[in-house]
Image (tube, coloured by chain):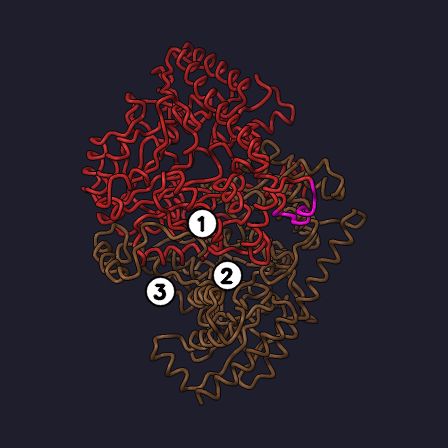
Chain colours: A brown, B red
Amino acid sequence: HSHQKLNYEPPRGLVQEKMTENAVFSQNKVLTIDTMNPNVKNVEYAVRGPIVQRAVQIEKELREGVKKPFTEVIKANIGDAHAMGQQPITFFRQVLALCSYPELLKDNMFPEDAKSRARRILQACGGSSLGAYSASQGIDCVRQDVARYIERRDGGVPCDPDNVYLTSGASDGIVTMLKLLVCGEGASKTGVMISIPQYPLYSAALAELGAVQVNYYLNEEKCWSMDLSELERSLAEARKHCNPKVLCIINPGNPTGQVQSRQCIEDVIRFAAKEHLFLMADEVYQDNVYAEGCQFHSFKKVLFELGPQYSNTVELVSFHSTSKCYMGECGFRGGYMEVINMDPEVKAQLIKLVSVRLCPAVPGQALMDLVVNSPQPGEPSYTTFMKERTTTLSLLAEKAKLTEEILNTVPGITCNPVQGAMYSFPNISLPQKAIKEAKALGQAPDMFYCMKMLEETGICLVPGSGFGQKDGTYHFRMTILPPTDKLKLLLAKVKEFHQKFTRQYS
Amino acid sequence: HSHQKLNYEPPRGLVQEKMTENAVFSQNKVLTIDTMNPNVKNVEYAVRGPIVQRAVQIEKELREGVKKPFTEVIKANIGDAHAMGQQPITFFRQVLALCSYPELLKDNMFPEDAKSRARRILQACGGSSLGAYSASQGIDCVRQDVARYIERRDGGVPCDPDNVYLTSGASDGIVTMLKLLVCGEGASKTGVMISIPQYPLYSAALAELGAVQVNYYLNEEKCWSMDLSELERSLAEARKHCNPKVLCIINPGNPTGQVQSRQCIEDVIRFAAKEHLFLMADEVYQDNVYAEGCQFHSFKKVLFELGPQYSNTVELVSFHSTSKCYMGECGFRGGYMEVINMDPEVKAQLIKLVSVRLCPAVPGQALMDLVVNSPQPGEPSYTTFMKERTTTLSLLAEKAKLTEEILNTVPGITCNPVQGAMYSFPNISLPQKAIKEAKALGQAPDMFYCMKMLEETGICLVPGSGFGQKDGTYHFRMTILPPTDKLKLLLAKVKEFHQKFTRQYS
């Protein structure tokens, strides 16, 4: 910390005494670990969990001059593109600057298309200001632009802007939908099916809401694909003790990097229809598809292609965000969700629910608008925009390939192709001795492994146990986001560490 | 809607048939009004409730050329300053533009202090970009600036940046704290004491969390002050059926406009200490104090002035935001909360909880930083900043006075002084005949009154029943934000309407 020391801070010698004092106070506190909401206590969120907290500490130690076997911490724990050096799209930032300080509209330094986008957004804001609240569902013209984007993306399948809700990132939308869906107690408590491995927002939200997490396992042998038989097994099992109502899918997959085939999506939709499940499709990586032969198919498009028997009945919500793809604008917390076949009475409830939080941050809404209404051929910013977009996506494709290839050269590491998204989730063989030692410390073996890697190399990964994995298997999640040179260095260090670790515990 | 008609939209003649079809489908839906989360169903939020939805419809009708006895809807329902024409602070918007598009740092059009603030914020962001995630608790240097601001505000009472959490507006912080605090079932369910009238975020959050709302009534006869005896009555009553653990205060008051005296705050703190209650102080209107003899005292400052017996034990969280005061930047959803005497184990849980949502939107964090680290004497932007700030606050003070004065000239309307915040909450006498007619329609009488006013005059107010009021009394909440001329017009129309309404139902 660089802030000045506070007067009331006790001298070093008193710390022990202070702690005892604290313990005494603690018993008298209103809010303690024993009296707090137990659901919150059950929440876990590995992506920012203990390993990341330790990484932050180590960074501080490095700044303070503590000697380490490395000079910097490389955070490959979270899909935070800009933090890894990815540059923002110029056009987006120009428009955001114009919207923030409309005086700039008088300036000649900005292209006309940036100015006209800014004017359009400002006109839709109360008092022509990003500082006014928007409608709780989001700015009207942004929702209209989102609807047109979805229609283009899905080859003309219609999208009604009334079904579009702007959100604070996809996480906000997912939590809001789960909040609507979860109820009941005991055997009638809502069950929510999530993939294992999963993105831990899901398990965290379910814990907080007190819902039943129903696991279905992705097939690692088949490139992390979804198996219908596994869905059936999982559902039948869950029905013995809860009321499974929701099926969540992440496509392209986080942490798996899998891109689902059209056939698989069809199967899932038929399954949901047959089994009366509400579908939640997390499609925030829709532009992040790298592998040859792979293509992004939205659940909505496939649903409509299956015909009215499905498209008029299956309840689906899909999520998108400004944080991933080629934009990587996580800090703006922009996003949207589209609901299909939602009961009109429930929609009214949803609007009421989001209105309590007033509105998603307006700069994030403006950014979402730019993503769905990006420069078009003939507009002055088009060439630069396309160049920036293509460069970022090609680099990601290159790094996806590189990551898979290098990891697969390491004996004891097996990595599925990173077909899409931003992560590899390789399988790691851990020696029995290491597993034993971890368990003696009360740690998950892959947490033990990742923590050791952090201490020895400065590389921050997330253990597979934070996402869920089949018993007896171990993984880590690593983003492919560092710049190519740094990524190569990182992969070389992972390789070296894994070999050393294996020797040490064999 | 300006969006193109969708292919799949049924021809007009089929609408009836489609609705029947919908009703049939609805029975088969997974998510219906009967199967959804009942806590969400219980949520009410009047500030954006049915009256505001009708106002939006009327605006649309006016655009479509429908004839009305007025030409525009005046929304005095929500504290949305920019929407009412208040101008943003130039310095804040310059820095935000610089942060959004750092190329502008090379330009000569911006003052040096704006540039240096922007550089400082960007340096604290991952990859020097507003697009990177921040720490979940908020950007370090922003929390440090908040801490220094609090220390200055409170005459040197120390503030540890580790106790500061940045939030998405104050609402987010309030909901997060309630989430930590609420637990239990039946008679051990957490009770949360809130003022009546209250800001309906509180009742909405409590409904969603399934907590027990414990009402204490403010004393309208004494300018909406808090009475200790009423707190005691309310608590004793609540202890018969739940476990009251939390006491919420809004100061300056929303919707009451009351500014609490130092003595009152002292009494409340002693009461909380004696009764073992966790204090939540909503202080988002801390710069909005207008009445002579009134002054803002933070709960924290008073707590520390009461001595270590209180300052070492009473658990307090206070909330602030970028949305109110002289900034009025609601759309950015910036805010912070400071926790005092929070159990360290609970703090760890709080950090975990906020980490699931990754981080508050970074532009809002940047704006919060500018509010707590505004231009200082000697800096190039100081004069303009102070002029803008003073103008806005003086105008608000003038409008607060104007509102009170004009409303009190209306027979049947009694309005307490608007000492602070942004609202008047006058008492309105309604004729028995009107009350009867409202009840026959299943409406709260003040909802009936406000809805009629909206239809006849285009003025959108919020009925007192949305905030809570003593049985048999009726109120409305009206913001003082419209520009002076428009406010005068609005008040004249309210006067005319009230007189006409009274005649009509007498």
Asked if residue B251 is positioned above or below residue A192 in the image, the reply reads above
Q: Residues within 10 Å of mark 3 (few under 14, many from 20)?
A: some
Mark 1: amino acid:
Gln
Residue under label 2, please give it.
A248
Residue under label 1, please give it.
B144
**Residue B107 colored magenta?**
yes
Q: Is residue B11 left or right of residue B17?
A: right
Q: Quadrant of residue B127?
A: bottom right
- Residue A241's disc is 3
Labels 1 and 2 positioned on one and the same chain: no
Depth check: give the residue in front, A166 or A422. A422
Mark 3: amino acid:
His
Indicate the quadrant containing the N terminus of chain A: top left, top right, bottom left or bottom right: bottom left
Mark earlier in primary sequence (2, 3) = 3
Indicate the quadrant containing the C terminus of chain A: top left, top right, bottom left or bottom right: bottom left
Label 3 element class: loop
The chain under label 3 reads A
Bounds of the magenta segment: B99-108
Discs 1, 2 touching: Cβ within 8 Å: no
Q: Position of residue A343 (x, y in %)?
A: 50, 46
Cα distance in 3D space between marks 3 and 1: 49 Å
Q: Position of residue B382 (x, y in %)?
A: 55, 34
The chain under label 2 reads A
Q: Quadrant of residue A308?
A: bottom right
Labels 2 and 3 positioned on one and the same chain: yes
Q: Position of residue A429 (x, y in %)?
A: 49, 83
